[in-house]
Amino acid sequence: MMNKIITPKFNGYAVSNLLAFVLIGLSKLLLDMRGLNAGIFVFSEFVIVPFLMGIISTWYWKNLQLTGRQLTGYSCINGLIAIALSYIFLKEGSICLLIVSPLLLAFIISGAFAGRAMFRQDNETLNVSVLSLLLLVFVVDSISLHEYKNEVSDQIIINAPVSKVWPLVVEYDRNTDPDKYWLFKAGMPSPVQSTVDGHYVGANRKCIFSNGYTFDEKIVTYDINQNLTFDITRQPRDPEIMGHIDIIRGQFILKDNHNGTTTLIGNSWYKLYVFPTWYYDWWAESITRNVHLRVMDHIKHLSEKK
């Protein structure tokens, strides 16, 4: 009796995760055949694949008479197995997996309940049609063009004139203040220092993060007391960002308010390689915004202190 329960449970976990890795491998192959970025994770890999995982696992569990709560629990375990396998075999970073986990779990659970409804109907034509449609969407999505860029802008008021703010925009001493953003507290590196080789267009600039990683930058606009713009020439090879996002350009704009204060505006442009953008861009904007604010708050503190 126990074996009759354990075997379907195991098969549900094993086959659904094996299917997921086969489909992700197929997606990468299709992208590679079209000469696209191998680091792209398309919409289907986070929506269609986990949904199919839920359906396939339920086919093995259909005779276990699971309650809704039990099916949800089984599906959560299935999702955690998928996340653990991604960490081991796909070399994904822990913060990335933390971000993706709500999306994966939601669609695995949704697929499981959809599968239970399908198999209760015992309609093979319907079941084959649904699975075929999902696989068709997967293939079409994998061979479609995926291109997404965005800009994030933030601003603060500094109680100091632009002449005091400008030097700290170009470069600033190490920030030892504790992090406020919850992802920084969870282990994501935060910006702590910026250095520059020279004060002119073409000079090299570095943005240093708390774990020692460095973004190499090149100054492309150097308007004293007004505009510092720099292109990112190299970013760290870190599993949290490599293949997922490219930071393209950064910028600081200073506006003299003519009352002894300065409006400091921080802009960043990035290219995203993970989809669906409605989910991942929300995270990318939040992270970029908090990078801005940590740097800008530090500049504010140093400017007002001087």
Image: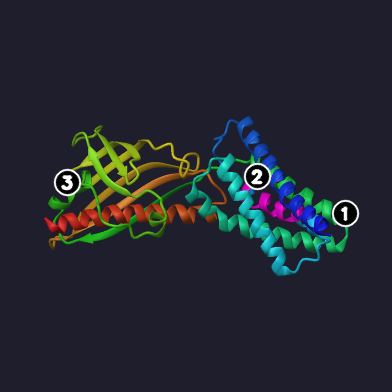
Q: Answer yes or no: is residue 264 visible.
A: no
- Give how far across and how far down residue 141 sits, in percent: 65, 44
- Give how far across and how far down residue 185 sits, in percent: 38, 57
Disc 1 from disc 2: Cα separation: 24 Å
Q: Amino acid at mark 1?
A: Thr
The residue indicated by pointer 2 is 141
Q: Which residues are magenta?
A: 45-57
Q: Is residue 274 left or right of residue 15?
A: left
The residue indicated by pointer 1 is 125
| Image depth: mark 1 or mark 2 in front | 1
Residue 211 falls in which quadrant of the image? top left
Q: Answer yes or no: is residue 165 visible.
A: yes
Tag 3 secondary structure: helix
The residue indicated by pointer 3 is 167
- Give how far across and how far down residue 161 sits, in percent: 13, 56
- Give how far across and how far down residue 280 sits, in percent: 51, 53
Q: Answer few, some or many: residues within 10 Å of disc 3's Cα (few below 14, many 20 plus, some between 14 and 19).
A: some
